[in-house]
Image: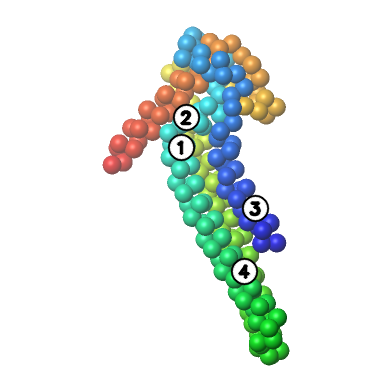
């Protein structure tokens, strides 16, 4: 049970890092994004995976999240090892007949309580991290969305679509590289993020 919780926790904590490292469907198109010649009224697109991978704000927030997640997982592991040690010592005393039945009963109940508290702690911390991860993703996606809206006020495109490494979940499977505005979006987002960091100093 404990090992299952730890495995689930580790999987949850790296979920964001894995999702941000997916490969682009068409790397050549991404490389050509700098040469976008789309005009006002065009339907254009950008690769969300590439933006998430190269967006400084996303990388900064993810770095903070990973550091915190690593610390929490270390604490979960530490508590788990301490519980295992206590259980091993109890079993060793039982095997050697060093405990009376009444004392053994008290210690056994104490170990059960420690096990329950440990599991509750591990689940609570994993839920907290999952919630923080969701809030972080919402922050990043909201920043991208707001930027794209402001960006299009100047560009006047008829529609801006997104694509990603998973062609089954993206509205754009393939497209003319001249309509790929990924680099433009990413450059603008990073420039805006740098300004916001400088103004907050």
- The residue shown at (60%, 50%) is 10
List the residue tagged with mark 3: 7
For the residues labelled 4 and 1, say whether their Cβ atoms are less than 8 Å apart: no
Contact (Cβ within 8 Å) of mark 2 with mark 1 = yes
Q: Cα distance, mark 3 to mark 4?
A: 17 Å
In the image, residue 37 above or below residue 193? above
- Determine which residue is flagged by label 1: 59
Residue that extends furthest to the front in the rendered view of this protein: 96
Q: Which mark is residue 51?
A: none
Tell me which residue sits at (66%, 78%) in the image: 92
Residue 194 placed where, x, y %?
Answer: 35, 32
Dot 3: within a 10 Å radius of its alpha carbon, few (fewer than 14), some, or many (20 or more) residues? Answer: few
Q: Nearer the viewer, mark 3 or mark 2?
A: 3
Residue drawn at the location 61% of the way across and 14% of the way down: 175
Which callout, 3 or 1, points at the residue further toward the start of the chain? 3
| Residue 158 picture location, percent across and down | 55, 16
Vertically, is 75 above or below 147?
below
- In the rendered image, which quarter contains the N terminus? bottom right
The disc placed on residue 84 is 4
Q: Secondary structure at mark 3?
A: helix
């Amino acid at each position: 049970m404990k090992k299952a919780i730890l495995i689930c926790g580790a999987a949850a904590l790296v979920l964001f890092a894995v999702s941000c490292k997916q490969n682009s469907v068409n790397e050549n198109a991404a490389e050509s994004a700098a040469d976008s010649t789309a005009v006002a009224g065009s339907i254009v697109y950008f690769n969300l995976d590439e933006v998430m991978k190269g967006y400084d704000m996303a990388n900064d927030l993810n770095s903070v999240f990973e550091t915190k997640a690593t610390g929490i997982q270390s604490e979960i592991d530490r508590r788990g090892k301490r519980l295992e040690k206590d259980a091993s010592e109890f079993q060793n005393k039982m095997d050697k007949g060093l405990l009376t039945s009444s004392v053994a009963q008290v210690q056994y109940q104490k170990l059960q309580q420690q096990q329950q508290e440990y599991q509750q702690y591990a689940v609570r911390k994993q839920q907290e991290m999952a919630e923080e991860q969701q809030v972080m993703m919402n922050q990043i996606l909201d920043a991208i969305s707001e930027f794209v809206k402001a960006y299009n006020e100047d560009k006047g495109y008829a529609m801006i679509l997104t694509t990603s490494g998973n062609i089954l979940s993206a509205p754009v499977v393939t497209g003319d590289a001249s309509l790929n505005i990924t680099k433009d979006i990413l450059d603008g987002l990073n420039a805006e993020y740098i300004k916001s960091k400088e103004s907050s100093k």
